Amino acid sequence: MFVSLLAGLSMFTVRGASNDQLEVYSWWTGPGEEEGLAAMAKSFEGANPGVRFVNAAVSGGAGSNAKAILASRLLANDPPDSYQRHAGLELLDDVRSGKVQDLSDMYREQDWAKVFPKGLVNNLTIDGKIYAVPVNIHRANLIWYSPKALKELGLAGPPKTWAEFLQQADVIKAKGKTPLAVGPEWTQKHLMETVLLGELGADKYERLWSGGISWLSPDVTSALDVYTKVLATSDVKSAAGDWQPQLDKVFSGSAVYAVMGDWSSSYLEQSKKLAYKSDYDVVASPGTDGVYDFLSDSFTLPTGARRPDLARKWLIECGSTAGQNLFNPLKGSIPARTDADAALYHGYLEWALQQWRDPKMRIVGSLTHGVVANNAYNAEIDSALGLFVQHGDQGKFARTVEQQFRETQ
Ligand code: GAL
């Protein structure tokens, strides 16, 4: 009797422990994406003995698959305990439909107003309440290349403008290589965003997202003309795979440039074992020197999370110095906190941190990664861009997105 009682107790303890889990949802799978998350998961489990970190990541860069699956889970009131969202207007729907909880109390307890940049916190605040915890800062407007390949092609350096890129593209094509590698649809949108930024400049780029200039204006029309030409130099017709295969084409030598965010640095250095400056190099995408097109990965506390107590602990880790120091060097991003240890960031990331902290740097928000457009508008841009890339009707694209801007605000 005594023995069976003990057995019953231990069974109870074991069952209790296995239920003790935190489900975290993101799109960080595969090389260059998963390492930082895995390090934080391990640290979380270490700090919370008996709690299992359930990594519910869904593959697909930029959340291309994860966001749709998350939407159906939220609709069915089956949220994970915490999920990834970008800072910016991407959060708006979740807040308006009551899917995420206000974290202002956590910000007060942790004194986070002092350590996160004001502009970033503004991008996490809706109607005076703060809804997510930022773990990093990424930069979108970058062009990646192999310095050796440029030398072999007789190119003095990466292009400073898109006009220069188009001149280089002729030289590159004549030598039988693809000037620009692209990947799936979201990478084509990422490219469009950087061409718009490079051609319009930061002021007009921002005004485009607030409705201050029209998609049908002469400036935007000529920026889209450039995008059309740039895309024509790429391998868009045969583009497949995600952003890693896109970069692979550059470093295997079939293509020369790729425009991509700085998660690339983690992939190139840690997975491909390439060295910054000698094997790979990167500069601001053409026309955007002095501008930081930013995005920030952040985590939320969903309404109806099964373990809000554990989710809060997770969010505190995401926002902590220790968590950010662990995550960012592996993820290929810089810390969202202003007080994190700069000595941990080497190679590309050292440069990124200097750029981000440069008081003269102009900071703008990413379209593709959730900052400047709400989800409905972003989805309309996706559909219209898919058709534009397929059929090349630039005028139709501009008219559609101009109209959709007004319909989705
Ligand atoms: C972004 C995300 C980055 C990186 C990238 C590629 O949207 O913010 O952390 O994961 O997608 O998947």
Image: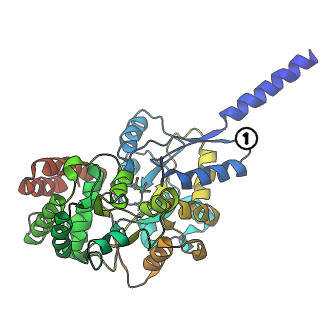
316, above or below 344, in the image:
above
Answer with left or right where residue 80 lies relative to residue 246. right
The kind of secondary structure element at disc 1 is loop
- Judged from this view, the residue extending furthest toward the right is 2
Q: Is residue 282 above or below residue 48?
A: below
Q: Which of the pair 61/264 is nearer the observer?
A: 264
| Occupied quadrant, residue 249 | bottom left
Instruction: Identify the image quadrant of the N terminus.
Output: top right
Which quadrant of the frame does ligand 1 lie within? bottom left
Residue at label 1?
Answer: 50
> What's the residue at 23%, 61% (across, down)?
177
Q: Residue furthest bottom?
A: 360
Q: Nearer the viewer, residue 165 or 8?
A: 165
Q: Can residue 140 be seen? A: yes
Relative horizontal placement of residue 17, taking residue 293 as reference (left or right):
right
Image position, residue 403 (x, y; %) = 12, 54
Q: Is residue 117 visible?
A: no
Residue 347 drawn at (x, y percent): 50, 73
The local crowd at label 1, few if under 14, some if 14 to 19, many if 20 or more residues have their Cα within 10 Å, is some
